[in-house]
Image (spheres, rainbow, N blue to C red):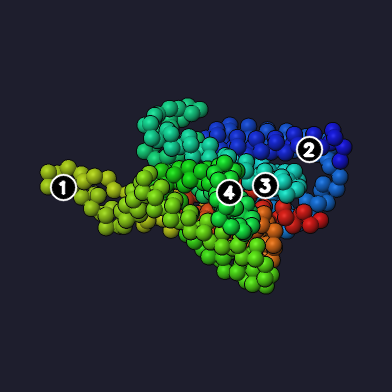
């Protein structure tokens, strides 16, 4: 590679990193104008990348991520099909019980609102391009580690904004939107989306920390003391402090499922990684491998003990626990009652039954639009027809990503997304089990933990409908494919 092409390639890479940090800043890019700006920036970076591509660029990307690219292509094709006019008999054969007439064409389209579905298609296209750009530009071990550091920096920035604003009690407007909340939420309007973003950045940070555990044994107490002193001024210390701040931000968000999903995924993936790492080290009979495994166990244990019991106790993890305890249906019934003075009782937390009410009723939409759904981004229009009288208010999302995806893109769309996630999980497991490369293990751990955490959170929220969270999820999903690409 010539010096000019190397410089150009570095510029493209830093352009991608700037997009990663930028995306959550303008209200998580979750407004049409912010999404349009993100599309323009992504398109400019795409043109810059393909104007003078590096040697065998497309071939390497295809070899490393053939399966997810095919599934992404089929997903985009499905969203296009929802906007193509077709005979009414075809829609009836697909169990589309409500057919929206396509004006002036004498046919019908799958989507019940073409404007919403076009916007949804544009968002999906931008995310797919960002996935491809990441696979193209992150093409070395050094760049994979740099990508992880940029993700951690973005999470650290969001956590600092969220914690500082909440602790000072400051109120402000961002792009004419009042940012007032008793919970930490960074530049996100919704604190649960803020928590979802930190779940992913924490997973990458933990994976990066695992990647830096070298397992070098100390010969005597003097070397051990020197090692501890060096650790205090090393990159590991800065990374550990960043993880602590992000955990504080996550706890301060008071997100019940966000905190639960993070710690459950840490325990599940941590135990899985330790069990299989023992198998790998037993086969290798390598002292360094055993020391690395021991360091990994100590690090994961320190995350649970230090971050939950000590830091959580300072910033208020007991308030998160209290929020979880106050989510039973009986508490909500008492909230609607009056006290002896005839005044309403204090407002209690929204119960799990209330949070899942929209999703339960939306399952009828899935039954009526079984295969292709009502069209991408149309839940807010289809749900009012299925909402019973006791459900009050406007629901723009189902507060359950699984039900919302099934209602909008049908079982075919859900199948494509499931296959893509399952293939990435399998690739991460194989990387974690078979690889002796500590960086590969750390990134595989990060991918497994991040995916597991957000899949748990998706049962009661809609993180995948947020462009910033969806983009970061795709980056985490792509981590195992980056190492597969390096083999080629």
Image quarter where the N terminus lies is top right
207 to 46, vertically: above or below:
below
Q: For label 4, count other residues whose C-alpha is less than 10 Å away and answer few (under 14), some (14-19) or many (20+).
A: few
Q: Earlier in the sequence, mark 3 or mark 1?
A: 3
Q: Earlier in the sequence, mark 4 or mark 3?
A: 3
* Residue bearing the label numbered 2: 9
**Considering the numbered disc 3 on the image, is that residue within a helix, a strand or a loop?**
helix
Nearer the viewer's eye, disc 1 or disc 4?
Answer: 4
Q: Earlier in the sequence, mark 2 or mark 1?
A: 2
Q: Earlier in the sequence, mark 2 or mark 4?
A: 2
Nearer the viewer's eye, disc 3 or disc 2?
Answer: 3
Give percent across and percent down for residue 240. 53, 46
Q: Which residue is nearer to you in this view: 418 or 468?
A: 468
Question: Looking at the image, do the residues carrying marks 4 and 3 touch, with CB atoms under 8 Å apart?
Answer: no
* Residue bearing the label numbered 4: 226
Nearer the viewer's eye, disc 4 or disc 3?
Answer: 4
* Residue bearing the label numbered 3: 145
Q: From this viewpoint, is residue 400 visible?
A: no
Q: For label 3, count other residues whose C-alpha is less than 10 Å away and answer few (under 14), some (14-19) or many (20+).
A: some
Q: Which residue: 36% across, 57% down?
A: 353
Q: Earlier in the sequence, mark 3 or mark 2?
A: 2
Q: Which residue is nearer to you in this view: 269 or 453?
A: 269
* Residue bearing the label numbered 1: 339
**Considering the numbered disc 2 on the image, is that residue within a helix, a strand or a loop?**
helix
Image quarter where the C terminus lies is bottom right
Give percent across and percent down for residue 148. 63, 46
Mark 4 → mark 3, Cα distance in angstroms: 26 Å
Q: Which residue: 49% across, 61% down?
A: 267
């Amino acid at each position: 590679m010539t010096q000019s092409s190397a410089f150009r390639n570095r510029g493209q890479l830093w352009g991608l990193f700037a997009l990663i940090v930028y995306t959550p800043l303008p209200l998580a890019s979750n407004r049409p104008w912010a999404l349009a700006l993100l599309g323009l920036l992504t398109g400019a970076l795409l043109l810059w990348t393909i104007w003078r591509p590096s040697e065998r660029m497309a071939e390497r990307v295809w070899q490393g991520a053939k399966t997810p690219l095919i599934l992404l292509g089929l997903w985009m094709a499905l969203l296009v099909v929802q906007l193509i006019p077709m005979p009414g008999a075809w829609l009836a054969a697909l169990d589309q019980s409500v057919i929206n007439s396509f004006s002036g064409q004498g046919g019908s389209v799958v989507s019940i609102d073409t404007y919403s579905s076009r916007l949804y298609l544009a968002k999906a296209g931008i995310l797919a391009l960002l996935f491809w750009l990441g696979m193209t530009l992150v093409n070395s071990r050094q760049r994979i580690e740099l990508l992880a550091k940029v993700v951690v920096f973005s999470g650290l920035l969001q956590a600092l904004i969220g914690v500082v604003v909440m602790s000072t009690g400051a109120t402000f407007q961002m792009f004419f939107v009042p940012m007032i909340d008793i919970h930490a939420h960074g530049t996100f309007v919704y604190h649960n989306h803020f928590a979802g973003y930190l779940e992913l950045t924490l997973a990458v940070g933990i994976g990066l920390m695992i990647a830096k555990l070298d397992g070098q044994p100390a010969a005597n107490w003097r070397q051990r003391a020197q090692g501890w002193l060096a650790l205090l001024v090393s990159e590991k210390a800065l990374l550990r402090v960043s993880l602590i701040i992000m955990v504080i931000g996550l706890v301060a968000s008071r997100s019940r499922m966000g905190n639960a999903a993070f710690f459950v995924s840490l325990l599940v993936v941590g135990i899985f990684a330790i069990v299989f790492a023992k198998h790998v080290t037993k086969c290798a009979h390598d002292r360094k491998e055993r020391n690395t495994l021991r360091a990994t166990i100590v690090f994961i244990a320190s995350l649970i003990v230090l971050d939950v019991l000590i830091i959580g106790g300072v910033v208020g993890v007991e308030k998160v626990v209290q929020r979880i305890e106050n989510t039973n249906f009986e508490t909500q019934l008492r909230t609607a009652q009056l006290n002896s003075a005839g005044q309403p009782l204090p407002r209690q937390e929204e119960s799990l039954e209330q949070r899942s009410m929209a999703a339960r009723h939306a399952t009828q939409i899935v039954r009526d639009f079984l295969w292709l759904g009502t069209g991408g981004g149309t839940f807010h229009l289809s749900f009012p027809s299925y909402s019973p009288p006791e459900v009050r208010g406007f629901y723009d999302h189902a507060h359950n990503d699984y039900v919302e995806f099934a209602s909008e893109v049908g079982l075919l769309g859900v199948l494509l997304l499931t296959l893509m996630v399952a293939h990435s999980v399998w690739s991460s497991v194989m990387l974690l089990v078979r690889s002796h490369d500590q960086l590969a293990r750390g990134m595989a751990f990060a991918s497994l933990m991040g995916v597991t955490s957000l899949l748990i959170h998706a049962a009661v929220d809609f993180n995948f409908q947020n462009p910033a969270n969806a983009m970061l999820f795709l980056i985490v999903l792509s981590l195992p494919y980056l190492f597969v690409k390096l083999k080629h």
